[in-house]
């Protein structure tokens, strides 16, 4: 059975933020695959829709047998179980789980784009990702995560929580 490496970003800004990240990690471990590595937890001001509480974010490296589409469906089900409501774009949420990378796959389907199309524009993604995998090569941009972070235009401060 082939194992794939998936980088997931978890985040949220409602309720007990740290507890929600822990619950999401446990659900991912139970339903997606084994959590191999976790970044530190980082706090960032809200991105996109700014008038809301700060977010906590963490990147997880997960080893899975699931194909990418099944990972997406599983993490969306976890979000729903944890009370995620998709009401307002960039709005407040209990939990958000984004697929950043799936091995070195390039996927463009109506429901899934991998690598995540905006990851290189967001410090709250790149800072925890660079902690785990600074040499990981973006298969489209042909730059490492470390290089993407150095060149990231996002001005938001991302600090360890």
Image: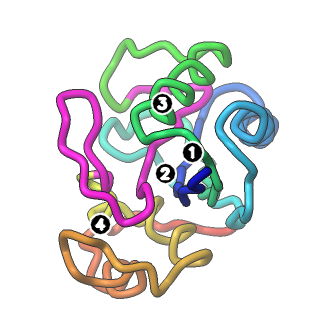
Q: Is residue 152 above or below residue 25?
A: below
Q: Earlier in the sequence, mark 1 or mark 3?
A: 1
- Of the image marks 4 and 1, the number of the one nearer the N terminus: 1
Circle 4: element type: helix
Q: Residues within 10 Å of mark 1 (few under 14, many from 20)?
A: many
Q: Earlier in the sequence, mark 2 or mark 4?
A: 2
- Look at the image and tell me in which quarter the C terminus lies: bottom right
Examine the image and state in which quarter residue 153 appears: bottom left
Residue holding disc 4: 120
Report the residue at 52% width, 69% height from top: 129
Q: Which residue is mark 3?
A: 70
Question: Any magenta on residue 53?
Answer: no
Q: Position of residue 15 (x, y in %)?
A: 72, 26
Query: In this rendering, which labeled residue sits more in front, label 4 or label 1?
Result: 4
Q: Residue at x 37, y 47 (%)?
A: 47
**CA separation, marks 3 and 4?**
24 Å
Q: Are marks 2 and 4 in contact (CB under 8 Å)?
A: no
Structural distance between the alpha carbons of marks 1 and 2 = 6 Å
In the rendering, which numbered label is found on residue 55?
Answer: 1
User: Between 19 and 147, which is closer to the camera in this rendering?
Assistant: 147
**Eye-nearest disc, 1 or 3:** 3
User: Which mark sits nearer the N-terminus, 3 or 4?
Assistant: 3
Task: Give the magenta part as a residue range.
Answer: 91-116
3 or 4: mark nearer the eye: 3
In this view, the mark in front (2 or 4)? 4
Q: Earlier in the sequence, mark 2 or mark 3?
A: 2
* Secondary structure category for the residue under label 3: helix
Expressed as whole percent of the image width and height from the top left, the position of residue 154 reads: 30, 66
Q: Is residue 97 left or right of residue 46?
A: right
Q: CA distance from mark 4 to mark 1?
A: 18 Å
Q: How many marks?
A: 4
* Lower position in the chain sequence, tag 1 or tag 2: 2
């Amino acid at each position: 059975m082939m194992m794939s490496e998936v980088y997931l970003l978890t985040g949220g800004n409602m309720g007990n933020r740290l507890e929600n990240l822990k619950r999401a990690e446990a659900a991912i471990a139970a339903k997606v695959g084994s959590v191999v590595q976790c970044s530190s937890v980082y706090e960032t001001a809200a991105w996109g829709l700014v008038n809301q509480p700060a977010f906590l974010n963490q990147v997880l490296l997960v080893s899975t047998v699931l194909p990418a589409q099944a990972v997406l469906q599983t993490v969306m089900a976890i979000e729903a179980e944890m009370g995620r409501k998709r009401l307002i774009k960039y709005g407040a949420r209990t939990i958000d789980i984004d697929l950043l990378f799936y091995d070195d796959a390039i996927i463009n389907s109506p429901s899934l784009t991998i690598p995540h199309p905006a990851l290189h524009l967001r410090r709250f993604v790149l800072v925890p990702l660079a902690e785990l995998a600074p040499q990981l090569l973006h298969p489209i941009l042909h730059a490492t995560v470390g290089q993407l972070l150095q060149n990231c235009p996002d001005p938001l401060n991302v600090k360890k929580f």
